Each structure stands twice: as C-alpha cells, then as structure tokens.
Amino acid sequence: MREDEIRNVVRQEYAKFAMAGGSCCPGAHSCCGSGPAADEIAKRIGYGEEDLRNAPEGANLGLGCGNPVALASLNAGETVLDLGSGAGFDCFLAAGQVGRTGKVIGVDMTPDMLAKARDNAVKGGFVNVDFRLGEIEHLPVPDNHVDAVISNCVINLSPEKDQVFREAFRVLKSGGRLMVSDIVLLRELPAPIRESVAAYVGCVAGAVLKDQYLQSMRSAGFEDVQVMAEDIFPVELVAHDPTAKAVIDGLRLSEEALKDLARSVVSLKVAAVKPGGLKGE
C-alpha cells in the first residue's frame, strides 16, 4: 500500500473504533465485544485503579500497549504532547499530573476520535487539555514548545516513522523527554502479514524491527535512548484478539506459525531525551 492509502485505512478504521468504543490492537488483547473489558485491558498493560478513576468514562478504549504517562515523571506546570491521542485517556492522566498551571496537547488525525476526546474533556471538566486535528508526521505545534512527548501504540501505524521522530524532536524544548509505548518486531514478519490491511490496522504489519525503531529515534537527534521494558505477547492472548484472529483465519496460519508470529511481536517502552540546555528553557 502507498503511504496515503495506509493513512486512509487507519483513519477509517479508527473512526469505527471511536464510534464503537472498542480496540482492535494486539497490544490490547481485546476488541469489539470480545475479550476483557477496556478497564481490565488497561490494568494488564500498566494502568492502575486510580488512573481509571481519574479519566472520564469513555476515554479508555483499550487501544494502548503500555502506560507512557507512568514513564514520563511529569511535573506541575509542564506542557505535554500526546501523539495519536485517541479518545484522550493518556492526555487526561497527564493533565492531572501537570495541574492547572500546565497544559496537555493531544494530536489525532481522526475527526471522530477528536470529537470524542473533546466531549470527554467537557465531561471531565479538563480545561488544560487542547485536542488538535493533525498527522503526527506534521504536528500542528510550534518548535521548542513542549517539555514532554508521549505516545501509546500509535507510531507503529505511521508509514513515516523517521519523520514522526523528527517532528517530536522539533517540538520539544532542549532537555525535553520522549516516552513511548509501542509495538516492534524482533524479526521480520512473513510477507502476507506485512501486506495485510487487517494486520496493519491491528498494529502488527506497520511495526518495524526493534533496532530500526531505536535507530530512528537516534537519527532524529535523541540521546540517552533507553528501553525501559520489553514484553512478548502471550500467544493465547494474541489468538483471542479479533483483529489478530481475522488475520490468522484469513491467512490460514497453522498453530506453529501463530506461535512464531507471537514470538516476533513485542511491546516496547522507550525513553529518550532531546539534548541541549536546561529543561524548561
């Protein structure tokens, strides 16, 4: 698929998720009425009961593969940017940490997601969160503007990951931090899976090799790139994800091929820093 075709497919499918309130990402092990509820998914990927209480109902769609806010060590008064903010779950958690003197910006390319996030902000009384329509490859944010960039299971969906990291670097202040949870590969996927639209929307086919992902961050200028955690998806959980199941059924994967696929896909938590002056300059 061409890059514009990939974006259109992802935009259309995530609009459906916004309307249905469900997840179809293997990182969530959920979706569309099948598997654990969104709150249970969130607990399994790093969120706590307090996180769930602090976000408006409907903000957690179970679309993540980790908790980047927990990695971020956010401070009162900081400005935070969320790449691919969805219905706003991570934005609202970040807003609670930066307080009313801080600000959170969420960027998403799906109008339906944006509408849902804005409604959630009103419901929850969040006045320090600003949701903007845009692509993470071309952020509607000025240079040297934010203290921290977070993202949760979104960069893997971009066909231009190098550009995403360059943009994240551009908008960060000197000394600013990048914290992401994402899907990467330990080895190349078979061609039929790489070319599958369902696998792409399900966060699998768009993923790149772990070393390539980390090198993209370094090439953008980030330093102190650290893998904070790395988890292989249990095969039994991947098998119960409806998107993954559709791929498996459609490609007629054997049990051994499924196990091989599961061993190839990991959830990665990564932190990095934009070099320069003191944080906040």
Image (tube, grey):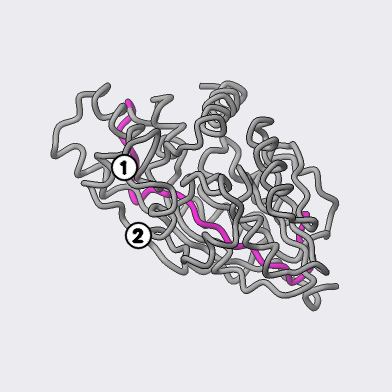
Q: Which mark is residue 231?
A: 2
Q: Nearer the viewer, residue 137 or 191?
A: 137
Identified at 30% across, 52% down, the residue is: 233
Q: Nearer the viewer, residue 85 or 186?
A: 85
Residue 128 spot, x, y in % from top left: 79, 58
In the rendered image of this protein, does residue 6 appear above or below residue 25?
above
Residue 29 lies in the magenta stretch: no
Tag 1–tag 2 contact (CB < 8 Å): no
Q: Looking at numbered disc 1 in the image, what kind of residue is underneath it?
A: Gly
Residue 149 spot, x, y in % from top left: 67, 59
Identified at 57% across, 38% down, the residue is: 158
Q: Earlier in the sequence, mark 1 or mark 2?
A: 1
Q: Give left or right: position of 188 versus 252.
A: right
Q: Which mark is residue 35?
A: 1
Residue 126 spot, x, y in % from top left: 74, 56
Q: Give left or right: position of 70 versus 114.
A: left
Identified at 52% across, 67% down, the residue is: 50
Q: Looking at numbered disc 2 in the image, what kind of residue is underneath it?
A: Asp
Task: Give, as a single range, the part of the protein colored magenta.
Answer: 170-192
In the rendered image of this protein, does residue 53 appear above or below residue 158?
below
Q: Give left or right: position of 41 versus 82.
A: left
Task: State the separation of the CA atoms marked 1 and 2.
Answer: 20 Å
